[in-house]
Image (cartoon, rainbow, N blue to C red):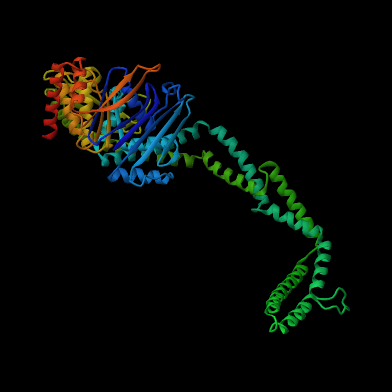
Amino acid sequence: MLEELRITGLGVIDDTTLPLTGGMNVITGETGAGKTMVVTGLGLLFGGRADAGRVRAQPGRAVVEGRLRLSGRFAETVHARISDAGGEPDEDGSLLLSRTVTVEGRSRAHLGGRGMPVSMLGEVGEQVVAVHGQSDQLRLLRPAEQRAALDRFAGPEHEKLLDATREAYTQWRRVVDDLADRRRNARERHQESDLLRLGLDEITRVDPQPGEDDELKAEVQRLEHAEGLRAAAQLAHQCVAGGLEATDDTPDVSTLLGTARRTLEAQAGTDPLLGELAARLEEAATLVADVSVELSTYLAGLDADPARLQAIYERRAALRALTRKYADDVDGVIAWAQRAGARLSELDTSDELLDELDREASRLAGEVAELAGRLSVSRQEAAARFADQVTAELAGLAMPHARVEVAVLPRPAGRSEPTLPVNGVEVGVGPDGGDEVELRLLAHPGAPSLPLQRGASGGELSRVMLAIEVVFAGSGGPPTLVFDEVDAGVGGQAAVEIGRRLARLARSHQVLVVTHLPQVAAFADRHLVVAKDTGGAVTTSGVRVVEDTERARELARMLAGLPDSDLGIAHAEELLAVAARERRS
């Protein structure tokens, strides 16, 4: 859960800290006090888009910090991802997050003690927090969002089937597009193929080898300076292995080193240091002997063959002709040939290849159609369960006669999507299959079944949204749920039922609710009030926890706008008592 949230320099909030609990947290306050900034701060903390216009001019930056404490699979998944990125939780297992936005629009993120991309905050947010506001209600009216909601509810096996459908669809469209491009641009492909083949033929005739140009350059250096190299090697060999003249009696280096070593060894008993020096002379003698052998081998292999030198000149000229056309060096020429060979296979427009691609496209089309059919059946099964569970929740939200239906319909053919026969019907098919999903509401018996956008009022849509979230929560989902005035347009008994449902949801999740309804606020485990201070030169807002009589006064203000009214306080205390009984039941 989110244990603490600190917001600095954001909108009307100068610097405030929200201590949060694991149950139901309610945030209330006068209109314009800054409740929305709390939700905005949460959005920033979990990777939302930054709006520099909301940053206070002083101190010139907004900072949102939070402390997460996770358990179970959420902790394992999030901690592992953060560890991979170089961060780590605190010693007590909690996780610190922060987001900074400047007035210039620059943004920075920190997670687990390390600077991170803002997208990493978004990854964590997707795992641990779900934010629902009035904009989410509008998204729920879109057919694609309704299909996504049903897919989310359907469960892990359905998700696997959906992933398989998307993968097969992607492969199918790739083959179809490749086939169409080869047929459409056959002439251009032939021209490019001819040019590539000319280059490959030229390179094949020369047959360059990796690093060959450097090897030939070194060999030319040796052959062109063979006499000088031979004279230097001979002189060095004579100095090491014998006298400078054949008749010279001057001892060689090895002999001199041997004499020096033996002389020192004879005195080693008197001074051990001479024994150590003698050992080092022995090592030197061994090294000199090795050098003498290598010099002898070098002289034997040194060749000044003019024919070989001419052949190298001709070979280097052939290689230079390739490097002038295709790359800076021989290795680059070889790489060009490899790329050209791969490109030739891409440019192939032979009848054999086109027939092969045609067969592959037909095979994949059949696979997509089969998967789309299974996906449709799975959606229809999930739709019945989804509709029953949401309808049951609506009964507890003061809509006892309402019913939600989920229609899974074949997508009409003839649109921009390709068409395939799915379960015997020609339908338009996309990555998500061939279905359109529509949530419908029967507001009362005898009423027509209408799409949500036509059949639900603002208050009814709020309750449908809440019912859907309760159903989602029962099948998993993030541990922290945020509701930003989703109870707009609701009052009376329906408001009490919404508070009761949110409290029930808070038994298994951390719930944060921004509300204007005292009936909802009464069910809170922790009540936070956003209050505006206009006493100074600059208007600021802060957040405080209210309890006992202070909480009753806040509810009285929400009820009648009169926090000191005895009647209002009595009504507020009655609401609190009802909510307390409900939480205990």
Q: Residue at x 35, y 26 (%)?
A: 40
* Quadrant of res 382: top left
The residue nearer to you, when weighing 145 against 184, is 145
Indicate the quadrant containing the C terminus: top left, top right, bottom left or bottom right.
top left
Indicate the quadrant containing the N terminus: top left, top right, bottom left or bottom right.
top left
Tell me where residue 559 appears, x and y as whole percent. Answer: 18, 17
Tell me where residue 71 appears, x and y as whole percent. Answer: 28, 44
User: Is 502 drawn above or below residue 112 in the view shown?
Assistant: above
Tell me where residue 167 appears, x and y as whole percent. Answer: 37, 39
- In this view, which residue lies farthest toward the front? 535
On the picture, is 203 further left or further right than 418? Answer: right
- Asked if residue 197 can be seen in this view, the reply is yes
On the picture, is 380 further left or further right than 34? Answer: left
Q: Residue at x 57, y 44 (%)?
A: 339
User: Is 71 drawn above or below residue 25 in the view shown?
Assistant: below
The residue nearer to you, when weighing 431 against 443, is 443
Q: Residue at x 29, y 45 (%)?
A: 73
* Quadrant of res 47: top left
Q: How many marks?
A: 0
Tell me where residue 105 appears, x and y as whole percent. Answer: 47, 26
- Asked if residue 425 can be seen in this view, the reply is no
* Quadrant of res 9: top left
